[in-house]
Structures are given as C-alpha cells and as structure tokens.
Amino acid sequence: MINVGVLGATGAVGQRFVQLLANHPWFRLTTLTASDRSAGKRYQDVVNWRLDVPFPEEVGSLVVEPTTVSAVSDLDIVFSALPADIATTLETDIAAAGVGVCSNASSHRMDRNVPLVVPEVNPDHLGLIDVQRDKGTDGFIVANPNCSTIVLCLSLAPLMPFGFSNLTVATMQAISGAGFQGIPAMEIYDNVVPYIGSEEEKMESEPLKIMGSFDGAEVQNAPFRVSASCHRVPVIDGHTMAIWADTAAPVADVIEAYKAYTPPISGLPHLPKESVNYTNEPNRPQPRLDRNRGGGMTVSVGRMREGLRYVAMGHNTIRGAAGASVLNAELIVSKKYV
C-alpha cells in the first residue's frame, strides 16, 4: 500500500478526495491537513460533511494536521485541494522534500515542466516527471486541469483523428464548482450568471497544452484555438457545455467513432468502463440524469449535429476535480514513478 494524504481535507474537493481514497485498493489514507483552527482535532469533529454519500467512518478518527511540509514529508503522494495562492509555494516545497504532489489547484498547471494530465488523453506527458527530477526535484508535481477543461478534453478525444483548427464552447457550470460557500443563494436562485472569474482563460489555454505533443523534453501546444464563454447555472453538480468544432467529417462517422472509442490506458481502479459515453437520446446528456455515470468519472456526449455541434456533460467535483487527481495518481503508480 502507498501512503497518501489530502491537503485541505475539509473543503468541497477535499471531502471528495477523502471519499475516493478512504477504501482505495492501492492507497492508504494516513494524513489529512486543514487550517490551523482544525489542526489537532479528529476529522469527524471538524468536517461538515456535505457529500451525497455516507461519511467514511474509517477515517473519522484521524487527527487533522496543519498544512505544512513536515506534516506530509513521510508520505509517498499527497493530493492537493488547496487554494491557488497557498498551493503555489507549498506544493513546490513538498515536491522538493521528495513527495509526489497530485494537484487540483491551478497554480502550476501551465508551468513548463509540470504535466497537465487527463490520463485517457495524454498519459505520455507524465514524462515531464523525469524532467523535474533531472532538474533536482526529488518529488514531483502533476496537475489535473480545470473542471470544465477536463470535460471538454475528454469529449474531444474521439474527435481528434478527424482534425479541427477552431473550437467554440459555451458552458453551463454547476454551483459546486465554486465551493460550499462560493455563491450566495440570492445570486444564483432563479438566475444564470454569465461570468466565472478566469474560467474562460483556463478553457482557452489548458486544452492546448493537454492535447499538445511531448517530445521527451517539453510539450508543444496543439495547433488549434479555443473560444470559450462560461456561465454559472443553478445546478448542484455537473458541468454541461455546448461545443462547436470546425471539422467537415460526416456526423455519422463521428458518432461511430464516439461509440467505438477506447482509451489508451487500462487497469486503473478509477478508470470507468466508459470514459466517454455517447447517447442517441435527443434530450441528453443532463446533469441530474447522467452526472453519476461511471461513478462520476464518465463524460457523457450527445446531440451530435452537422456543423459540427454537440453537447458534453461531466461531474465537476469527481471527474473534474478529486477523481481526476486520483486517476492521475493511479497512472503515476502504474508507470512506476512511485
């Protein structure tokens, strides 16, 4: 068993990490960190459990540690659910101490030597771990993308063989993406908010790195452009997006490619049976009906039309956050980086 911990274990993404790791077949969850006001207390006494699954009693008695390098220095991997401003320095210091960091934070996603990974799309980018170690870092940092970027990139994987140069995407993003306290009720009830800070910039830059080519030393960005418009809607979990791609491929051929798609990896505990599920139903996918497909790890695609236009949807705190980091860690272990 590989000893792991969670940085920021009491927040929305931190709780998802705890849920996914509590009974993991490869990882032993030994350390949970949080703010100083929670440190020294049992996890069950400080966490306000808000997930739609039972609290994992087996980790309830773990004493919460302060979020410091020394608290996690004896671990093999830590999963970071930290705010970006804290993660920037702390994740670097933890990696320098010889610990692998699988991060959900945005701090290092676009760093030249940090792989930004969606395992089904760019598993070879983990080669940047070797680049980090060659530069003197005993540990490493591997980042997962922004939640909406993950849904977009997974939905594009079956389309890549057909080629395109421009993408347009309009998102309808769930409120859980802003955390438990992120959006006041009076702002989101009976409303759509047509702005999410820095979200559009992430969606326009991150896919180019993820879907770029790795030459053993660095990643060359993919040769397409993304134009994004991001919106917050009154849905609890599940980001939905409408996507336009400038490909002339026949719709029937594209649909067949989606139905036949298999990812280039296998054998990982959190890899779903279907990474991308295509539905022919004209009114799907929908968050309430489809977000928990594949344990929340499947991206659902439908409404494929000439143009090329389609709709994609995925669970933002599982596939788009904690589950993405856990799957990254499983891939890292399978490639023997840990």
Image (cartoon, rainbow, N blue to C red):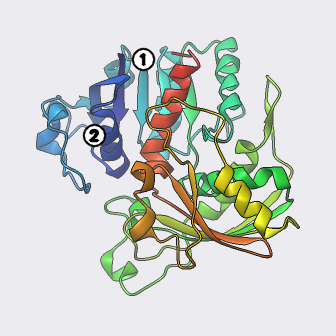
Q: Is residue 260 above or below residue 255?
A: above
Residue shown at the point (17%, 29%) measured from the top left: 62
Could you tell which of marks 2 and 1 lies nearer the N-terminus? 2
Label 2: element kind? loop
Residue 104 visible in the picture: no
| Left or right, residue 246 beside residue 145 | right
How far across and how far down the image is residue 60, in percent?
15, 35
Q: Split into 4 quadrants, where in the image is the N terminus?
A: top left
Please give the residue where the numbered disc 2 appears in the rendered image: 35
Q: Residues within 10 Å of mark 1 (few under 14, many from 20)?
A: some
Residue shown at the point (39%, 62%) measured from the top left: 176
The amino acid type, in three-letter code, at marker 2 is Ser
How far across and how far down the image is residue 132, in percent?
66, 20
Q: Is residue 101 above or below residue 231?
A: above
Closer to us: 156 or 260: 260
Q: Is residue 43 above or below residue 11?
A: above
Q: Residues within 10 Å of mark 2 (few under 14, many from 20)?
A: some
Residue shown at the point (66%, 32%) measured from the top left: 123
* Residue at mark 2 to residue at mark 1: CA–CA distance: 22 Å
Residue shown at the point (44%, 64%) measured from the top left: 290
Residue 10: name its quadrant: top left
Please give the residue where the numbered disc 1 appears in the rendered image: 76
How far across and how far down the image is residue 63, in percent?
17, 28
How far across and how far down the image is residue 137, in percent?
60, 15
The amino acid type, in three-letter code, at marker 1 is Asp
